[in-house]
């Protein structure tokens, strides 16, 4: 359960970091647009860098969410009850569907099939 708590805290920290990144970026963009001598390349670089970091944070959140969902499924299976459902049942529909398809593919590979 310690891993579960740590991973949930990490997800929340990365979500907070995404919002902070966007807030600082919009402020920097506003300053650059206001300054007449700002290079277009500097603005493009800022926007590109923010896009890359924002995507990275999203990817890492998705990876951590997968592990949290796996822990939830394991604990719920051992207890024969649905006590934990933060990511496995209440996460985004897209993430849940992606996880379900990935598990189906993994089961197919174990049986010797490729889906």
Image (cartoon, rainbow, N blue to C red):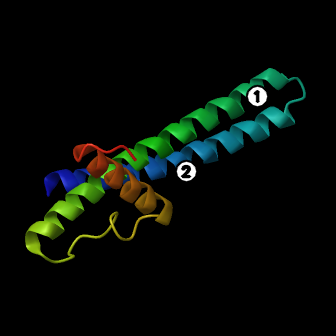
Q: Is residue 45 left or right of residue 41?
A: left
Considering only vertical position in the picture, is 74 above or below 25?
below
Residue 86 horizontal/vertical position (percent): 32, 67
Numbered tag placed on residue 44 in the rendering = 1
Numbered tag placed on residue 5 in the rendering = none
Tally of numbered discs: 2
- Which quarter of the figure has residue 98? bottom left
Residue 9 horizontal/vertical position (percent): 31, 54
Seen from this angle, which residue lies furthest front?
113
Q: Is residue 56 left or right of residue 102?
A: right
Report, in whole angstroms, how far the alpha carbon at label 1 lies from the one at label 2. Answer: 20 Å
Residue 47 horizontal/vertical position (percent): 70, 34
Q: Nearer the viewer, residue 43 or 84?
A: 84
Q: Are marks 1 and 2 in contact (CB under 8 Å)?
A: no
Closer mark to the observer between disc 1 and disc 2: 1
Seen from this angle, which residue lies furthest left?
78
Q: Which residue is mark 2?
A: 19
Seen from this angle, which residue lies furthest right?
36
Q: Residue at x 42, y 48 (%)?
A: 61
How many residues crowd mark 2 within 10 Å: few (<14), some (14–19), many (20+)?
few
Q: Nearer the viewer, residue 32 or 74?
A: 74
Q: Nearer the viewer, residue 18 or 58?
A: 58
Asked which secondary structure carries label 1, the reply is helix
Q: Residue at x 70, y 44 (%)?
A: 26
Q: Is residue 26 left or right of residue 63?
A: right
Q: Is residue 40 left or right of residue 55?
A: right
Q: Residue at x 61, y 46 (%)?
A: 22
Q: In the rendered image, which quarter contains the N terminus?
A: bottom left
- Which quarter of the figure has residue 101? bottom left
Q: Earlier in the sequence, mark 1 or mark 2?
A: 2
Asked which secondary structure carries label 2, the reply is helix
- Can residue 9 be spotted in the picture? no
């Amino acid at each position: 359960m310690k891993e579960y708590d740590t991973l949930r805290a990490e997800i929340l920290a990365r979500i907070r970091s995404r919002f902070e990144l966007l807030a600082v970026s919009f402020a920097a963009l506003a300053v650059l647009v206001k300054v007449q001598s700002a290079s277009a390349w500097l603005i493009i670089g800022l926007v590109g860098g923010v896009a890359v970091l924002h995507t990275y944070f999203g990817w890492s959140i998705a990876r951590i969410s997968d592990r949290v969902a796996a822990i939830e499924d394991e604990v719920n299976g051992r207890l024969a009850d649905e006590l934990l459902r933060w990511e496995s049942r209440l996460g985004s529909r897209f993430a849940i569907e992606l996880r379900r398809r990935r598990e189906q593919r993994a089961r197919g590979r174990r049986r010797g099939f490729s889906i």
